[in-house]
Image (cartoon, rainbow, N blue to C red):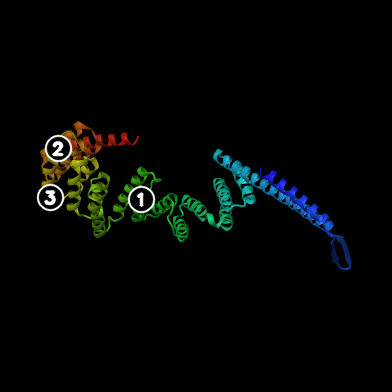
Amino acid sequence: MKLILWLLALFAAAVAVTLAAKNMTGRALLEMPPYQIELSLDHFIIGVIAAFFIFYIVVRIILGIFGFSRRHRHKKTDEMLLSGLKAYFEGDFVKAQRNTAIALKLADSSTAQAICAVIAARSANKLDEITARDQYLRTALHQAPDEKSLCLATKTEFLLNDRRYEEALKTLQSLYADGGLQSTVVLQLELEAQQQAGNWDAVIELTEILAKRQSANKTLVRELKHHAQIENIRSKASDLQLLNQYWQHISPMEKMDSKLSVAAARAYISLGNCTIANRIIEQNVPITWDDELIELYAECLDYHVNRQIECAEVWLKSQPNNSQLLLTLGKLCTYCELWGKAQNYLEASLSVEPGHKAHFALAQLNEKLGKHELAMNHYNKGLELTLKQLS
């Protein structure tokens, strides 16, 4: 419709100019020293119109050629990029690197340049071509500074794969320098870097941030936080004050977790603080019935052992066939030289579930009682069970 209107307008203008030219008697003088051209006014007007149309047609032809070249360039870029992506996901990293490198040279948008460079860099990394990998990323950062986040995140991932967490953290800091809300992927990269560095407080802080993100894997985040808490407790096992501060900071609900309780009890035992260690165990065993916690109850012995026996015997009413609880009671009674009770508990533990630890405990008990033959018999049985577990 537009084309028809333009043609009508053009014909109307041509008619108007023709009619006007018939009534014009003037002349036009064109002077370009040393030449002079004298034309009638109607010929001059017709010449100007013809020159305009010739100029217009030439411009359209030039623009058409340029547009065709640009469209061809875009088409070639898209073809090389898509072919490179396909090859990358198929595992043909040589082809992926070659095609995306071509696309990188042809691309004229910063987004396309960054994507091409990252795929080429990842392909080079798979081929262990480190120099080429780093060069692609430098090219992307230079040519597509607007896509800095994509390039630096990729660089950080490469550094973490090489266990170069200090450089990874520096790279992330240069990314954070721009400010703004960081993506979940970037936070996950920092989380991995802090894990490698053993900065467990930072890991816990990051998991708490990620737990609020819809795009984060909540189950994985919880597992990572749980692991970081355990490692944090272990890292503070040489300083009672730091350990106390951290354990008090943990919520009551988290303290009910058996693995955290085991880590805390072990840390306090290593510091010789049996009172707090046993308190942690006593608070958690009736809830979790964790065998590792029950076993630790016989690891830290002080003047409260008789009270520990009473507490464990209360637990035994709820768990009469718990072999680990029977073994722990046997060890506690041995420490207090309650030989008869100790032997009964240890033998009961073996009757529920034969284990090398119970055999070794009975061997030590019989040695103290001077029953060396029985002691040797239990040592042998314990050794057999240990070898069977190792095989």
Give the secondary structure at mark 3.
Answer: loop
Three-letter amino acid code at the position of disc 3: His
Q: Is residue 258 left or right of residue 76?
A: left
Give the secondary structure at mark 1.
Answer: helix
Give the secondary structure at mark 2.
Answer: helix
Three-letter amino acid code at the position of disc 1: Thr
Q: Earlier in the sequence, mark 3 or mark 1?
A: 1
Q: CA distance from mark 1 to mark 2?
A: 39 Å
* The N terminus, quarter of image: top right
* The C terminus, quarter of image: top left
User: Residue tagged by mark 2?
Assistant: 316
User: Residue tagged by mark 1?
Assistant: 207
Quadrant of the image occupied by residue 368? top left
**Closer to the camera, 269 or 369?**
269
**Closer to the camera, 153 or 167?**
153
Badge 1 local density, few (<14 within 10 Å), some, or many (20+)? many
241 w.r.t. 160: above or below: below
Q: CA distance from mark 3 to mark 1?
A: 40 Å
Q: Which mark is residue 304?
A: 3
**Closer to the camera, 17 or 147?**
17
